Amino acid sequence: MPDEIIPPVLSYEDIRQKADEFLRRYHAECTIPVPIEEIIEFQFGINIIPLPDLHKLFEIDGFTSSDLEDITVDQYVSETRPGRYRFTLAHEIGHVFLHEDIFRKRDFQNVGEWKDFINSIPDDSHRWLEYQAYSFGGLILVPREPLMTFTKETVELIRKERIDLDNNWDFAWQVIAEYLAKRFVVSTEVVEKRLTYDKVPEKFRK
């Protein structure tokens, strides 16, 4: 019988520290957008494998093999949805970076075996694993310092144009998030969560 899967205990700040460590080791230049595909392929030596209809048939965008040698992604997403594709890769490398020991204790190579692995995990443990990988993905694709720098530039531009940010607060931040998402090449949802977790809008209230 397989060993019980016990996720590491990591707060959001713990995950941030792990993400910062990842960026220092694999993308010290911190240019934006973060070249996540190149990091995975050339620095980790992991194969990225497009698979047709992965999402349609299994309702997932990607998964990582237990030997950590392959990340399989939905082909349509990889070819047409750059933000979603990049986040899928960042999420999966989060599992590699945070959960290596858990993955290597199992043996699955294809999506069916991966599904069996996932179904064997208690719901609470699975939620923790996914939360950690999701948070890690957002933190490496939208690092704190570039996020603050780009947000400051955008807010200053808005105020320079005499647009009343403070009396149109929610709408303005929605527009800001959409603009930043294009710079980081991620979805607006990813940027909105990063802005929220780092309490960025509060720093710009007058």
Image (spheres, helix red, strand yellow):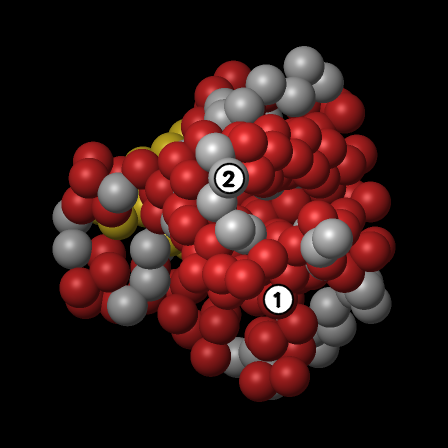
Q: Nearer the viewer, residue 169 or 58?
A: 169
| Residue beneath disc 1 | 131
Position of the N terminus, as image quadrant, is bottom right
Q: How crowded is mark 1: few (under 14 residues within 10 Å), some or many (20 or more)?
A: some
Quarter holding residue 10? bottom right
In the displayed orientation, state which residue is furthest to the bottom. 123
Give residue 144's mark. none
| Type of amino acid at the residue the image marks with label 2 | Arg
Q: Is mark 1 on a helix, strand or loop?
A: helix
Residue 112 image point, x, y percent: 32, 65
Q: Distance between the residues labelled 1 and 2?
A: 40 Å
As drawn, is 43 to the left or to the right of 188?
right
Residue 6 image point, x, y percent: 75, 72
| Type of amino acid at the residue the image marks with label 1 | Tyr
Residue sitting at 74 percent across and 53 percent down? 206
Quarter holding residue 34? top right
In the displayed orientation, state which residue is furthest to the front. 162
As drawn, is 150 to the left or to the right of 12?
left
Give residue 162's mark. 2
Residue sitting at 64 percent across and 61 percent down? 196
Q: In this view, does 158 lie above or below 58?
A: above
Q: Nearer the viewer, mark 1 or mark 2?
A: 2
As drawn, is 44 to the left or to the right of 20?
left
Mark found first going from the N terminus, 1 or 2: 1
Q: Which of 84 and 59 is in front in this view?
A: 84
